[in-house]
Amino acid sequence: MDFVKRLYERFSSLVHELAKFGSIGAVAFLIDFGLLNLCNVVLGFGPLTSKVVATTISTTFAYIGNRFWTFRDRDQSGLGREYFLFFLLNGIALLFGMLTIGFTTYTLDRHDALSVNIANIVGVGLGTLFRYWSYKKWVFLEATEPIPMELPETGVKQDR
């Protein structure tokens, strides 16, 4: 039992971070999935255009959720810098989805919604692995100074 406790203490912050990242990712996936189908099936945009629209909107949600919840304890190197890198890396991750959807639609000649959705799920899965690694490495950086657990002594006496 002591081993499990030590293991949990060692990896608890990673487990919590992954849980938050997964929660944001799940909601972003639902946004992506819903918009992909709305744009492709209902509005008739085509699978690749629909994927770009869906990913752009779901990525905006994911940035806000990851910046202000998942990685809130990490240094903020400037919202402009983070937002730019976040979208750049999501553009690279979008290629996974575009390749799987494009391959399914144009190489395998599968144009039905089920095939596009399966290709989307595979692409999102591959892109998620890339995104988690790249966010931690380049976007939401580790704090350079330890975050204080308590307020510092100011030397100012307060009247009671």
Image (spheres, helix red, strand yellow):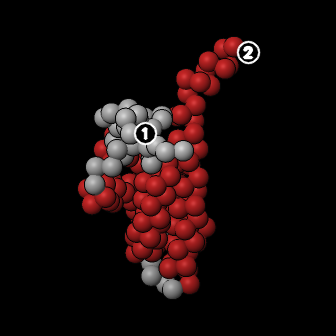
Q: Which of 112/41 is in front?
A: 41
Residue 1, numbered label: 2
Q: Would residue 87 be found to the left or right of residue 122 on screen?
A: left
Question: Where residue 106 sits in the image (x, y, percent)?
Answer: 42, 67
Query: Can residue 72 be seen?
Result: yes
Answer above or below: position of 36 versus 11: below
Q: Which of 80/138 is in front?
A: 80
The part of the image, by quadrant, that contains residue 73 is: top left
Question: Where residue 6 sits in the image (x, y, percent)?
Answer: 62, 18
Q: Would residue 160 be found to the left or right of residue 76 on screen?
A: right
Using a 10 Å C-alpha cutoff, classify the residue at mark 1 as few (fewer than 14 neighbours), some (14 to 19) or many (20 or more).
few
Q: Amino acid at mark 2?
A: Met
Question: Where residue 133 sits in the image (x, y, percent)?
Answer: 40, 41
Residue at 39% in and 43% down: 74
Answer above or below: position of 81 versus 105: above
Q: Amino acid at mark 1?
A: Lys
Using a 10 Å C-alpha cutoff, classify the residue at mark 2 as few (fewer than 14 neighbours), some (14 to 19) or many (20 or more).
few
Residue at 31% in and 58% down: 79
- Nearer-N-terminus badge (1/2): 2
Q: Would residue 97 be found to the left or right of residue 118 on screen?
A: left
Q: Which of 64/118 is in front?
A: 64
Measure the C-alpha gap from mark 1 to mark 2: 46 Å
Which residue reaches farthest bottom?
43
Callout 1: SS: loop
Callout 2: SS: loop
How many numbered circles does the render carry?
2
Residue at 40% in and 34% down: 153
Q: Which of 99/9 is in front?
A: 9
Instruction: Give the quadrant of the N terminus.
Output: top right
Contact between labelled residues 2 and 1, with CB atoms less than 8 Å apart: no
- The residue identified by callout 1 is 157
Instruction: Give the quadrant of the C terminus.
Output: top right
